[in-house]
Amino acid sequence: MSIVTSTLGFPRIGPRRELKTALESHWAGKSGARALLDDAAGLRAAAWARQLGTGVTHIPSNDFSLYDHVLDTSVMLGVIPSLYEWCGGPVSPEIYFAMARGTRGRAGGDLPALEMTKWFDTNYHYMVPEFARGQAFALASTKAIDEFLEAKALGIHTRPVLLGPVTYLLLGKSKDEGPDPLSLLPGLLPVYAEVLKCLAGAGAEWVQIDEPCLVLDLADAQRDALAHAYKVLAAAAPDLKLLLTTYFGGLGDNLDTALGLPVAGLHLDLVRAPAQLDDVLSRAPAGLVLSLGVVDGRNVWRANLPAILDRIEPVAARLGTDRLMVGPSCSLLHVPIDLDLETALDPDLRSWLAFAVQKVGEIAILGRAIDRGRNAVADELEASAAAAMTRQASSKIHDRKVKARLDAVTPDMTRRQKPFPARRPLQRDRLALPAFPTTTIGSFPQTEEVRKARAAHAKGTLGDSDYRAFLRKETETAVRWQEDVGIDVLVHGEFERNDMVQYFGEQLSGYAFTRHGWVQSYGSRYVRPPIIFGDVSRPRPMTVEWSAYAQSLTAKPMKGMLTGPVTMLQWSFVRDDQPRERTCRQIALALRDEVIDIEKAGIPIVQIDEPAIREGLPLRRADWRAYLDWAVACFRLTACGVADATQIHTHMCYSEFNDIIDSIGAMDADVISIETARSKMELLEAFATYRYPNDIGPGVYDIHTPRCPSIDEMTALLAKAAERLAPDQIWVNPDCGLKTRKWEEVRPALVNMVEAARRMRLASR
């Protein structure tokens, strides 16, 4: 019997971002719902065909989403808050996208979007399920069944994917003193059972149920919930084989729970947690199929196939091929689609890489090697081994000067000269700001005109001098507008920047960039993560010119803007031949040079953004301290080369920070700005017991929705913040940068923000 080779999920966006085009055309009113759904069907069909063509045998369905798979699960279950006015039956695209993005200008008022946060320790964002008192569940979407049948009609028998019921509940939140989410499990399971029965009736043989919660620290009640859930689900469709899928870590102390569930198969992430295989093999019940995630689904490096075969061939001999599956560590959602599109990459670097299509091909090669022997794929194995050897020895990776500088770092380089209480009066004297000072996070709208100019410059049809003149004009316009509306600390708008990581990475040694390596962050927001392939250094200043030019236009203080070292690391595909900590320290040293040069140019404030610091937190609490120690040290290594009168800001968004607030304080930034508007200042609950020592800007404007918050709404948020913070600690700012918004949305929102700050000043006198 041939071994099963499989994928757990495939990128949704299309090789050339076709989904983004379709979504934004629909949102702009240029195309209807039917056209959007037709485009989506075409993308699904192409993805299935692409995977089928490689020879893998289990291809997923229901891994596609118009926005987010967690939101899709909420819609499937009828978990739709009352404010969206759903009256039962199929959920319309209007309600679906209102939950995802909010609405603007509806009769009766705007609708906010659901809260959004990071998916485990990735840069993918999911829409947080919102549970209410008396929460009921009903099958409101048959998407999982429809897409299975859609593939079947094309002659492709797929393995449907569902987000597991326990993970789904643990990802959600109850509002307004609603129920404990886990208590909702009995009402939830009948809907899952109905879906499984429908899939069995449609002809499905296997269903993949993702329970990544099994790699977290779980309480006994949560383990009991898993046992109860799978007893119900296994009984719902007895002939259906369930593949329990875990990823992003090892099972650890949840292993007995996982092995005790009545499922046909268990998937293991053997990239993140290779050591767990021996324990599983020694304790797995007879007949359990093991799915080995041996190809990295979260990074772009080509697999060393002979080395992987050395590990899994003994497993195949022990279990037999009928009890074995081979696949990626997790869904390939987190990597770009096709390396073949990258014709401009350095040939050596290109030979070291594999994107989603190539990873599926690697999985198929492993399957053929196990089925037919290594000789059947000898050429492929030889090429894989040769790429691994040339990468390891390449002079393009190693820089002796960088290594020597890193080894020379001293503890004093990670400390400011004076503590914050002594720095604060020096900075206040220099900046002369009012109470509740206003600022923005950094970027202003990147209009179509800005994007066209950048594209024309990249193509060579707009010369350097003309492009610089254009950027100077945009910068001056933004500075003058900020002065006019009364913002206190200005930014230059970042019109010269393509992306907050890419812009810096393109100017650092050791980084490489793709042209089509897009990965979904949320909805239609895609990023092209850079590839850190070698030792990192800064050949020349990166941002000083634009910050200095902006400061020359105004007497108000200007912020210099940088992306911090942890975020530069987390939002990149990182080399895997040395510890991540070492790579991060290299980045920190390069950015430290930039911070010092910004200060020398006369800029009084430097903002070092670290939105990914929470994202990098290990999933197991026992591993937190080691990570937080080096992450905080890297931030401080970046920030601590300046004088005490220079104010250091940092920004973080869309993550839960309450449980690491002491480490956030240890970063010793003079001012931190965080997302709090969408969560209604929920993140400030940490300050009920923790006295944050420095200044803080709790965001009052949720920029990931087109709606404009009112003055009263912002003032109420600030008043709520003042219940937890001293008034002289509070800054006033949006939740995040304004790059993705339109000027017609931004202008009234920031005018309202300035007025809200003015009201707070009056109220505090």
Image: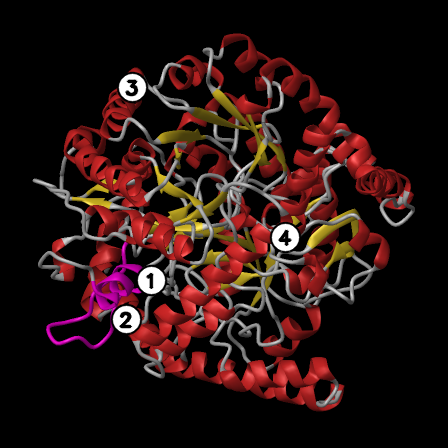
Looking at the picture, tell me which residue is in the foreground, 145 or 473. 145
Magenta span: helix, strand or loop, mainly? loop
Residue at the location (48% across, 58% down)? 12
| Residue 643 in sight | no
Label 4 – label 2 distance at C-alpha: 38 Å
Residue hosting label 1: 702
Q: Which of marks 1 and 4 is in front?
A: 4
Count of numbered tags: 4
Label 1 – label 3 distance at C-alpha: 39 Å
Q: Are marks 3 and 2 in contact (CB under 8 Å)?
A: no
Q: Earlier in the sequence, mark 1 or mark 3?
A: 3
Quick one: SS at disc 3? helix
Residue at the location (36% across, 61% down)? 732
Q: Which of marks 3 and 4 is in front?
A: 4
Q: Position of residue 725 (x, y in %)?
A: 31, 46
**What is the number of the mark on residue 357?**
4
**Left or right of 757, for residue 492:** right
Quick one: SS at disc 4? helix
Residue hosting label 2: 707
Q: Which of marks 4 and 2 is in front?
A: 4
**What is the number of the mark on residue 240?**
none
Q: Give the range drawn in magenta.
A: 92-114
Label 3 – label 2 distance at C-alpha: 43 Å
Residue type at tag 1: Asp
Q: Are marks 4 and 2 in contact (CB under 8 Å)?
A: no
Q: Earlier in the sequence, mark 3 or mark 2?
A: 3
Q: Position of residue 209 (x, y in %)?
A: 38, 35
Q: In the rendered view, how is the structure colored?
A: secondary structure
